[in-house]
Amino acid sequence: MRAGALALVLVLLVIGGVLVFRDYAAMSDAPEPLDDRGGVFVLLDRPGVPVSTEVVVRDSKLELRLEVGKGYAGQEVGYSLVLTGSGTAVGPDGASCPAGITSATPVSCHPAQLDPELAFASPEQPMDAQVVAGRITRGDDGMRTELTIDTGRRFAQLDGKRTYFGLPAIGTAYLAPDERRTVSFAVGSDKAFVPERLDLSVDYGDLPVTQRAETVSPEPWIAGSLFWFAEDAATVKARGALVDAVTEDHEERTLFLVGLYVGLATAFVPLLLPALWRSGQRLRRSRD
């Protein structure tokens, strides 16, 4: 009877250890690295045009709204969205756009060799890019257009209690105000200009009540959200880590149970094994 009780205690310790360390191993698994998600650069076919750009980021999609400022008196302007990096859709060979790019107005897509200065790359490493080109024409409600880019890759990576996120660099190339009307960038065979002024907002949603921001750069415009706004901006490239309070509590309980199990095993296993050995010896003698 005593041997059976001791064996049961040992079995329970083993089962408990397997369950506890399974949770601990899952908690310690390393995720795949969150690589760079590239960039989205706004360029125009002429200088001296102010533009505001609103970007809503959801899952793997970038929803963009471009609006020409009231200071521009023309009837239309051509724009190019220059997409770079692993987080953008694959460039097609012709004028048609892939299914991941949709627009309220006609657009064309083509690959291009990007000016290294625009891509923040060295001249020895020119960057391939995809260009989404369209036109914004004046209507009754002003000059604006909307389009969506589905990159096919999420901008976040879960690692235990933390969610790491990295958004593409969104904006345009930096030029001093006195250079914006004279300096152009080569995008393939075309010349492109930065907006006279770019007001930029990036919306990655609100923080759930169970999450808190551990590190976020740059500082969000509104507390409790992942929303950035910049006036007369170059680019916004948001990065950060969010902590889930529920998962954090679970991990703390798991670590506590690991410590408790190690303590119990350290205390009881040295006592159980000799007792089991003696019980086995007595059982064999009684059978003899």
Image (cartoon, grey):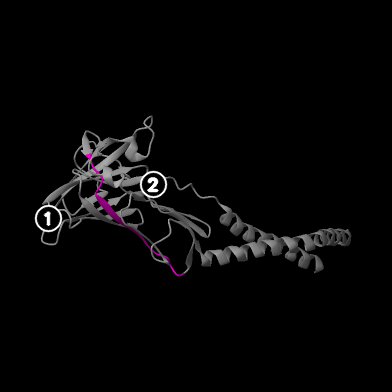
The image shows residue 264 at horizontal and vertical percentages of 74, 64
Q: Which residue lies under the disc numbered 2?
A: 37
Q: Is residue 57 left or right of residue 24?
A: left
Query: Which quarter of the rendered picture does the N terminus lie within?
Result: bottom right
Q: Which residues are magenta?
A: 192-209
Tell me where residue 205 appears, x and y as whole percent: 37, 63
Element carrying mark 2? loop
Q: Which one is nearer the viewer's eye here, 119 or 73?
A: 73
- 236 or 40: nearer the eye? 236
Residue 222, by quadrant, is: bottom left
Is residue 215 shown above or below 127? Answer: below
135 relative to 86 in the view: left or right: left
Q: Which residue is mark 1?
A: 138
Other residues around mark 1 within 10 Å, as few (<14) / some (14–19) / many (≥20):
some
Q: Quadrant of residue 120?
A: top left
The residue type indicated by label 1 comes to: Arg
**In the image, is residue 242 above or below residue 87?**
below
Which residue: 27% across, 49% down?
100
Which residue is pictured at 35% across the width and 50% down the height?
235
